[in-house]
Amino acid sequence: MARIFKLDNSASPEYQIDYDNLLNQQQLEAVKTFSGPVLCIAGAGSGKTRTLIYRVARMIETGINPDGILLLTFTRKAARNMLNRVSELIGESGRRVAGGTYHSFAAMMLRQYGHYLDLRPNFSIIDESDSGDIINLIRADLGLNRKETRFPQKKTLLEIFSRHINLEKPIESIISEHYQHFSEHTEDIKKIYRNFNEYKENNFLLDYDDLLIYLLRLLRDKQDARNTINDRFRYVMADEYQDTNGLQARITLLLGGTRRNIMVVGDDAQSIYSFRGALISNIIEFPRHFPDCSIIKLERNYRSSSNILGAANSLMKHSREGFAKTLFTLREEGEKTALVSCEDDEEQALFVAARILELREQGVSLNQMAVLFRSSFHAYQLELELKRRNIPYVKWGGFKFLESGHLKDIIAHMRVVQNPQDQVSWLRILLLIEGIGTQSATEIFNTIKNQTDPFDFSACKVRPKAKEGLIALKKFLRRALELASEKPSKILDLAAEYYFPIMKRHFDDYPRRMKDIDALAVICGRFSRLGEFLAEMALEPPRDASDNNLSGKDNDDEQLILSTIHSAKGLEWHSVFIIQALEGRFPSFNAIKAGENLEEERRLMYVAMTRAKQNLAIVHPKTVWDPSTGGLLFQPSRFIDEIGAENLEKWEISR
DNA sequence: CGAGGGGTTGTTTTT
DNA sequence: CAACCCCTCG
């Protein structure tokens, strides 16, 4: 058989992809400039993702090793989607590009290079519910769990600690600035903080903030490690750079600063994470670090009709901070943004549900519609109405799938198999056994933690009632341990089998909960190692039972999206509803109180509006009772005025 | 000491 | 509406 030989003319690379015709001038410039520092200011809907994808593709086509490219994004899903699309363009080599969030990248680096910091590679990553459990242990230990005077809850304590890390301010300042009512407890709070850190160190646990801190230490203080990492990742790209905080910015500069092949992409008008320490100044001051950097602005919006974009631009004219660009579009005018005043929460829900069905009749698929809100509880009423009408929906943001008790129980069983030193998980699973309460659970843990075989309960004294339960637990743990080197889904199946009678005893609605466990099993099936599965569940938990965020492909089921605005970042829909647009809800009370946050609320509204392609509706109840203040909210959001009547079309509701 | 009932509380936003 | 606390009974 004859073989056709293709001559490779490597002097001037022949690109498979016709970049010149697929991208506009500015996008093309961003795609072609890959050596040297680049700042890319990319407005909403300006084809930012597309630009990044083509940039990676072109790098690889030019001959750059994909293993040496690092793409830092806001979610792992975003990274996976991009790399899938790169692979569609140029083939499998796209998948070799390293990508993920700052946190997941940190976890990866620390597993490989943590020894420079004397960190064991098998550390566990804990989420905030684990941290909460630890805080409870510490509080009980310190005798600070009594409720004589108002003492912050574990959730509040964790917020204070996290702000301390991410805003890089002392705990005292955090308390005096945001939590004044707890200032009398400052010393106790600091004590809990010290013990919390000690506990994590002793048990080889890292929380989200620790991941960033350790990575920064590694890059900053351990030159050998930094050199190794810099040699490995020669091209660094950071997306959503307006939402990085001080730690993340320093990490980025340490990663890309040596070779200076660094591109940051972002939009100062879309910065919405200041509560997590995000600094707009990071993106604005990037040129100060790299005075010779190229600055590329993507200002053409491809997403929204010109009426929607006009309304959004009009809103941003009221922003105190000047922005470096104005978006334009060549698209048709389209419908005006609808402004809908409803009597109350219930009518708002009725309207949204009815309008969604109307659009559905007109051929807009449910997948192409989204309802956005400031806080997740704003959608309660609507959720009831959607259930009543059998409109399928998924809710993003707010409470997560994995936070439900039964799934935490399953995960705890798996964690004990992986790490028998995990006190928090031990206590959780022991408490499920009949006849064992906090007291005996603690005793059992103290007995077994120093044993060579931690799954042997023979030395534990418990009441007769609990004996049987311990035998069953032991049987499960032994069998699971035998499977430890096999696929984690086998351990999950075993845990589910063991857990089923417990669940039946605890929850009336156990059939529904069983379905959640099945869904978790599907996700688990994609992993080949137990440690990987557990780390991923901590770092990027699935949003709901049908979430495919680990496969990177979208859900085919036709369902409506309900989402907090924060979780809607980077996405787009044919039709968008923004609900609860009234003072106290959006902007939120907290933001109105502390005037500076108002700027961020406005940007949040801007982000919400610019998600819409064809239809945008801003909806609010005329009056609504607010449980947090006990008062009535009745002022429409100030942002409605700022958008301006000329950009809005009022809709009347007739019943 | 553990279990289960009942009342109270308070809810931004996320990795 | 769920998580938390407190109480009482077994």
Image (cartoon, coloured by chain):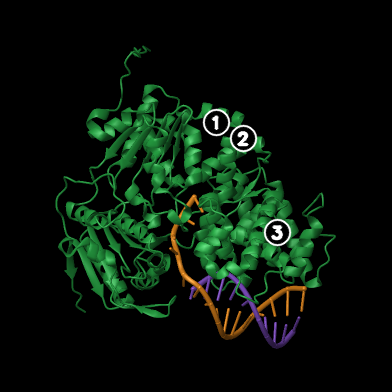
Chain colours: A green, B orange, C purple
Q: What chain does mark 2 sit on?
A: A
The residue type indicated by label 3 comes to: Trp
Q: Which residue does the image show at 24% across and 62% down from the upper left? A: A642
Q: Which residue does the image show at 31% across and 33% down from the upper left? A: A30
Which percent across, then down, holds residue A261?
Answer: 42, 29
Mark 3 lies on residue: A426
Which percent across, then down, holds residue A137?
Answer: 69, 63
Question: Mark 1 vs mark 3: which is more N-terminal?
Answer: 1
Q: Is residue A551 visible?
A: no
Q: Is residue A349 left or right of residue A278?
A: left
The residue type indicated by label 1 comes to: Ile
Mark 1 lies on residue: A229
Mark 3: which secondary structure? helix
Which percent across, then down, holds residue A41?
Answer: 32, 41
Mark 2: which secondary structure? helix
The residue type indicated by label 2 comes to: Tyr
